[in-house]
Amino acid sequence: MKKNIAVVYGGNSSEFAVSVNSGRQVAANIDSTRYNVYEVLLMGNSWAVQLPGNTTIEIDKSDFSFVSPQSEKVNLDAAFIVIHGTPGENGLLQSYLTMLDIPYTSSNAFVSTLTFNKYATKCFLRDTDVKMAKDVYISKGDKIEPEELVRQLGLPMFIKPNASGSSFGVSKVKDVKEIKKALEIAFSESDAVLVEEYISGRELQQGVFKAAQESIDLPVTEIIPENEFFDYEAKYMGKSQEITPADIPDELAERLTRLSSLIYGRLGCKGIVRIDYILHNDEIYFLEINTVPGMSEQSIVPQQLQIAGRSLPETFTLLLEDTLARR
């Protein structure tokens, strides 16, 4: 009997539209000969299955099921989480599904909560050999001295929400007078802000997926943004070059792969993740990890899979089989 797979997208953050695009691409590329695929859109308290003909049916949150138009109860066997931001990337949805004993494709609730918090992730990696930019953590209400931030981190610097994605709320600050405005923008996305020193270099990204059956180390992508940095326009509106595989020596690609594997294991990740780096003077600096990476046509991981000769249906089958085996 085919398993019922819920592809869950949407969410309650600025990344809603990105998530919808990713979710629909995922749903279209799951092997329908092996699984029954149901798209589930989350918007606030509304969790609804999207059926053909613009028909929607609310999910019964007591057991993650729904009643079909034929009045049959449909139990969802697993969740393919494609929500960027809350509640699908920060551990909330994972906690709910864990309580119901429903497997899901991403990392567990603890790892999801940890990795969604940029500062906590860096703290978790500090006793490894992973190089990272110097930073200052600021909570809402903290007294802020812009000149002190410049003294500690120099200029330019990055000011970003501590818990957010898709570059929402991120500013590259070149003048001390810009700091307060950049903090306001970052605080509009998160209750805490991470201020980091600027490290010049090449931006590199790599997808990683370790299943029980096999591990997949994807090729490295170099990002060359037209804007100041890899912001929303660069990511989703064509304002960047994305070169896969990156034009780097084999030795460097191997170092990146080893580092990505170390970080994946150290943080306890599951499923497909994407890790972002800056290459500065042949030194690799960790930027952040995304445990629910974009899966739209414009996203990095699908591009890397294509270059690696792996189709999305093949990859999603491996991911779902690995997920269902955890039950």
Image (cartoon, rainbow, N blue to C red):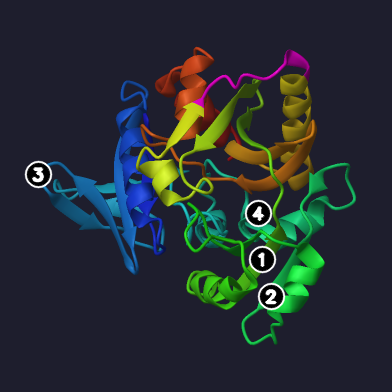
Dot 4 corresponds to which residue? Answer: 115
Q: Looking at the image, which residue sits at the far left? A: 53
The residue at 40%/61% (across/down) is: 14
Q: Residue 140: percent from the left, percent from the top?
A: 62, 82
Q: Circle 4 sits in a helix, a strand or a loop, which is it?
A: helix
Contact? badges 2 and 3 (CB < 8 Å): no
The magenta span reads 243-251
* Earlier residue among tags 1 and 4: 4
- Identify whether 131 is placed above or below 175: above
The residue that disc 3 covers is 53
Residue 248: image quadrant is top right
- Compute the Cα span from label 4 to label 2: 18 Å
Q: In this view of the protein, which residue sits in the foreground, 133 or 156?
A: 156
Residue 226 pos. (x, y %): 46, 40
Tag of residue 138: 2
Disc 1: which residue: 194
Residue 250 falls within the magenta-colored stretch: yes
Q: In front: mark 2 or mark 3?
A: 2
Distance from label 2 to label 3 (Cα)?
48 Å
Q: Nearer the viewer, residue 43 or 229?
A: 229
Q: Amino acid at mark 1?
A: Leu
Q: Quarter of the image containing the C terminus?
A: top right
- Under mark 3, the amino acid is Gly
Q: Secondary structure at mark 2?
A: strand
Mark closest to the chain's N terminus, 2 or 3:
3
Measure the C-alpha gap from mark 1 to mark 3: 45 Å
